[in-house]
Image: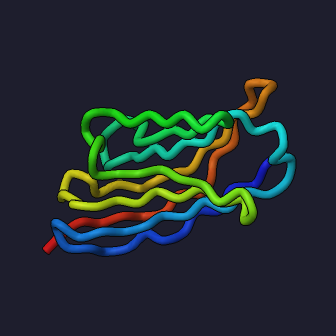
Amino acid sequence: QVQLVESGGGLVQPGGSLRLSCAASGNIFSIVLMGWYRQAPGKQRELVATFTRDGSTYYPDSVKGRFTISRDNAKNTVYLQMNSLKPEDTAVYYCRSTQSTGRDYWGQGTQVTVSS
């Protein structure tokens, strides 16, 4: 199993920045992909960024150029740096890991609110 714990959410003004963290523990050696997702009230959960084991990243157009996913292997932690935040970025942000077996694990989520 893999345990994921997110942190770093909060309230920020439009145009501001936040950095989310996702600390992984457990069977981390079988992780092939890490990702950040978000879910706003009344909306489906959507992909924000992914980071594969070989270092490839992916961002949807909605966050490309503003968000950056990175990792610290020594700390078993994946980060999401969010810049130029907009009110529409308000959501609960979740960390997800995918194992080589195809099994997924999710964190508990962290709230990000962008408001003046």
| Image quadrant occupied by the C terminus | bottom left
Residue displayed at 26% across by 73% down: 12
Q: Quadrant of residue 101?
A: top right
Residue sitting nearer the eye, 73 or 94: 73
Q: Give the residue at the far front of this rendering.
A: 55
Residue 75, by quadrant, is bottom right
Compared to residue 2, the image places residue 33 above or below, namely above
Residue at horizontal 33%, vertical 48%?
Answer: 40
Q: Which residue does the image show at 43% across and 69% down from the upper left?
A: 9
Q: Quadrant of the N terminus?
A: top right
Picture coordinates of residue 91 (x, y %)? 34, 54
Q: Position of residue 22 (x, y in %)?
A: 60, 59
Query: Measured from the top left, where is residue 89 in percent x and y?
Result: 27, 53
Q: Residue at x 32, y 39 (%)?
A: 43
Residue 92 left/right relative to 24: left
Side of 81 relative to 16 (left or right): right
Q: Position of residue 28 (x, y in %)?
A: 81, 47
Q: Is residue 45 visible?
A: no
Left or right: where 112 falls relative to 116: right
**Res 25 seen here:** yes
- Comparing 65 with 102, the one in front is 65
Residue 59 drawn above or below residue 9: above
